Image (cartoon, rainbow, N blue to C red):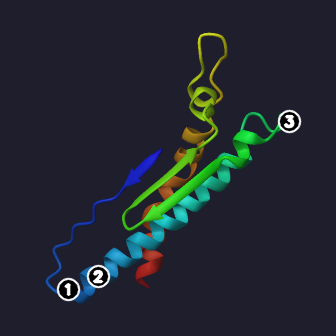
């Protein structure tokens, strides 16, 4: 799952624009960390080997961030297959935390 933000302001000063961008970058990183943490908590196969849980990674750089599984089958768990029903765990984590982004940005501007 990738999240990319675009920040536009009508501010005339570079200093204020830089502050908004910095607050946005920090906010996105905080939200990406919260999403990744939640993905691990609500992972559907906790009683198995734990391989997919351990494979959950995240990256946040600038105004872009990602949360993903490196197990090779994390996407199949999320969306299901012809033989197995879906067990969404990425989308619910995203839905739970994406609304925190504006508040995180505001907090960073105080």
Q: Which residue in the structure is indicated by mark 2?
A: 18
Give x and y (percent) for residue 105: 42, 71
> Circle 1 sits in a helix, a strand or a loop, which is it?
helix
Estimate the x, y position of residue 57 in percent, counting from the top left: 60, 53
Give how far apart the Cα atoms at labels 2 and 1 are.
6 Å
Q: Are marks 2 and 3 in contact (CB under 8 Å)?
A: no
**Dot 2: element:** helix
Whether residue 78 can be seen here: yes
Read off the residue under disc 3. 47
Query: Can residue 42 be seen here?
Result: no
Instruction: Tell me which numbered mark, 2 or 3, is placed earlier along the sequence.
Output: 2
Above or below for 1 versus 58? above
Q: Quadrant of residue 74?
A: top right
Within-10-Å neighbours for mark 2: few <14, some 14–19, many 20+: few
For the point 50% across and 66% down, the residue is 29
Relative to 64, is 51 on the left or the right? right
Image spot of residue 24 (x, y percent) = 39, 70
Give the number of callouts: 3
User: Mark 2 touching mark 1, by CB under 8 A?
Assistant: yes
Distance of mark 2 from mark 3, alpha carbons?
Answer: 46 Å
Residue under the point 59% across and 26% down: 76
Residue 64: quarter of image: bottom left
- The residue drawn where x is 56% and y is 25% is 79
Mark 3, other Cα within 10 Å: few <14 / some 14–19 / many ≥20: few
* Residue holding disc 1: 14
């Amino acid at each position: 799952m990738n999240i990319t933000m675009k920040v536009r302001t009508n501010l005339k000063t570079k200093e204020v624009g830089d502050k908004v961008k910095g607050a946005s970058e920090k906010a996105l990183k905080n939200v990406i960390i919260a999403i990744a943490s939640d993905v691990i908590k609500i992972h559907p196969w906790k009683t198995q080997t734990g391989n997919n849980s351990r494979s959950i990674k995240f990256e946040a750089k600038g105004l872009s961030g990602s949360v993903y599984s490196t197990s090779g089958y994390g996407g199949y768990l999320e969306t299901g297959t012809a033989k197995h029903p879906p067990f969404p765990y990425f989308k619910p984590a995203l839905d739970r935390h994406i609304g925190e982004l504006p508040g995180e940005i505001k907090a960073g501007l105080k």
